[in-house]
Image: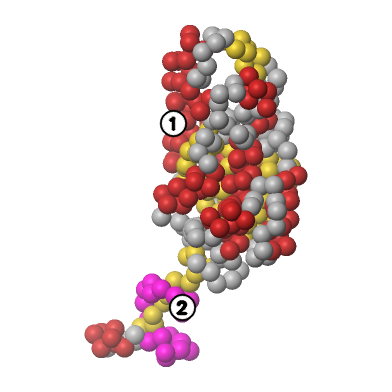
Amino acid sequence: MVVQRYRFFSPTDAARVSRLQFTAKQVVEGVITGMHKSPHRGFSIEFSEHREYTQGDELRHLDWRAYARSDRYYIKLYEQETNLRATLVLDSSASMKFPTAEHARHHPSESQPVSKFDYGRMMCACLSYLLSMQQDLAGLCTIDERVQIELPPGSSPAHLDRLFKSLERAEAGGGTGLVEGLHQLAERLPRRSLLVMVSDLWVEPEAFLKALQHLRYRKHQILVLHLTSPAEMDLPYTEQLTLQDLETGERLQIDPAEIREAYREQTAQFVQQIRRGCNDAGAEYHAISIDVGYAEALIRLLARRR
């Protein structure tokens, strides 16, 4: 595939991810033969189990060794493999705009060239390209207070072009409606899909857990990529500053030195609660700091999953 110039995907990205492999950890359903395990049985790929012969079965699938041992006819069953339907869910709430341009002006020493939203857009672009190269299907959904962009899964070059351009059109703003959006997707996603969530997860943990449980009840596989910023996690400032909630506009003046220890403790507890909730719901959780290059973070992620 010829890679055009896109804002959030480049030929360099294509070269980096083309050597990687993204596989489903649980069974999935698709429409063509692929590299992921299917819940169905067939007569191809990898041996799974036997069943007793019934009239009409093809004789070429008889296990003659089993017949020699038991004097009974058995048919060999094999695992079928299929392609993967994945939906990339990008949180587009206002908190994903951090670090903002204003923050960068006030803290020029910090080397964070992109916001969490732009970082998430680049990760989604790389993942969708990788899935497409595997003949898997990638879709896109952006959610702030409601679902803003919803592109069904596909794998053709034209579909990938639409997905990249949708990422360029997407904007971060508004409140957080991620939980409600996940409940809607749980009902709409076809078959056993993979949902890849890219978010900073500034949500109510209990409500988020219920959304994950809804997705798992519908047999979907969930991969949670939790984007974090060192500035948000550690509060590394030395002078008094005014914090602003990007979603509500509320402002609060603080002395970082006075609250840093308690802030870090509460933040760590919040992340642990989110991680535990994902584990309890059977979702795969990975924390990704945006001070690590997105391509390097993706390589590390796929290495951990192997």
Q: Residue at x 70, y 19 (%)?
A: 249
Give the mark, 2 or 1, whose residue is nearer the N terminus. 2
Residue 237, x across and y down, in percent? 52, 16
Taking the image as shown, residue 222 lies to the left or right of residue 95, namely left
Is residue 61 rendered magenta in the image? yes
What number is the disc on residue 272? Answer: 1
Viewer can see residue 171: yes
Span of residues in magenta: 42-62
Q: Which residue is mark 2?
A: 44
Image: 40 above or below 284 = below
Quick one: SS at disc 1? helix
Nearest the eye: 156 or 153:
156
Residue 142, x across and y down, in percent? 68, 43
Locate the C terminus by quadrant.
bottom left
Locate the N terminus by quadrant.
bottom right
Q: Residue at x 46, y 79 (%)?
A: 43
